Image (spheres, helix red, strand yellow):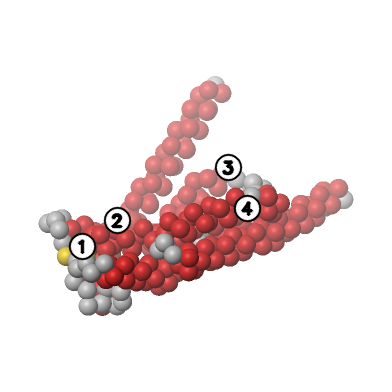
Amino acid sequence: MRAGEETMTLLAHVTELRSRIWRMLAFVLLSLCGGLYLSPKVLRYLKSVPPAKDMTWNVFSPWDGIRMYMTIALAFALTVSLPFILYQLWGFVRKGLHPEERAAALRYVPYSAICFLLGLSFGYFVVYPMSFAFTTNITKSLELVETYGVAQYFGFMFNIILPLAIAFELPVVVMFLTKIGILTPKALHQMRRYAYLVLVIVASLISPPELLSHLMVFIPLVLLYEISVLLSRAVYGRRKRNAAALAEASGT
């Protein structure tokens, strides 16, 4: 009987997971329709502002135009769908969380979306123009002809802004893990030197190979980490106070 109950519980979880996956896919497809409508407008806007202004985008394959059209539409759909996807994931795992963990996870859903958008903005408006200007200057110094393929242009751009958008999720992730007791400020302090080493590697990978550019990327990443430490301390302190108050109330 117990085995049968476990089987029924597993089937219920699988059914719920499948249902939520279908909801997420439906929302992404609906957002994709909006992305397909906006994709030409987005491409024209990106073409009209620096660094792409007065630049000729070439295609080296019959599929390049369609690929970029769909890539922009899909990027728009995933960005718009991110809060809904996170909410569905929260809805699936919430039954296995304590009430406090449940509330914390739901509260951090909009924060994670906001941090992702901030990371995209920082990558596109700050790091990407700097990286593009550096590579363009190198090209001109070598007296090479600048001929840009649209697929290569957007590939270069996405390789810079997407890692930064993910890195900007660090404060939210640290706060949530501290809230549920997986991370502590002491652990973050102990791993600081290793975290800095990882941040140096990330900054060197997504910025031009010169010291000033490395610093312009490394410093914001370090600030994100230190902000995460401060937020972790605040959340950890509040968690300890709540636990003490609960213990005192139970003792009373």
Cα gap from disc 3 to disc 2, whole angstroms = 29 Å
The count of marks equals 4
* Residue 48 locus on image (x, y percent): 26, 78
Q: Is residue 66 left or right of residue 182?
A: left
The reply to whether dot 3 and dot 2 touch (C-beta < 8 Å) is no
Residue indicated by mark 3: 96
Within 10 Å of the Cα at label 2, are there few (<14), some (14-19), or many (20+) other Cα atoms?
some
Mark 1 or 4, nearer chain start: 1
Within 10 Å of the Cα at label 3, are there few (<14), some (14-19), or many (20+) other Cα atoms?
few
Looking at the picture, tell me which residue is in the foreground, 81 or 187. Answer: 187
**Residue plotted at (53% across, 23% down):** 3
Mark 4: amino acid: Arg
Give the SS element for disc 2: helix
Mark 3: amino acid: Gly
Cα gap from disc 4 to disc 2, whole angstroms = 43 Å
Mark 1: amino acid: Gly
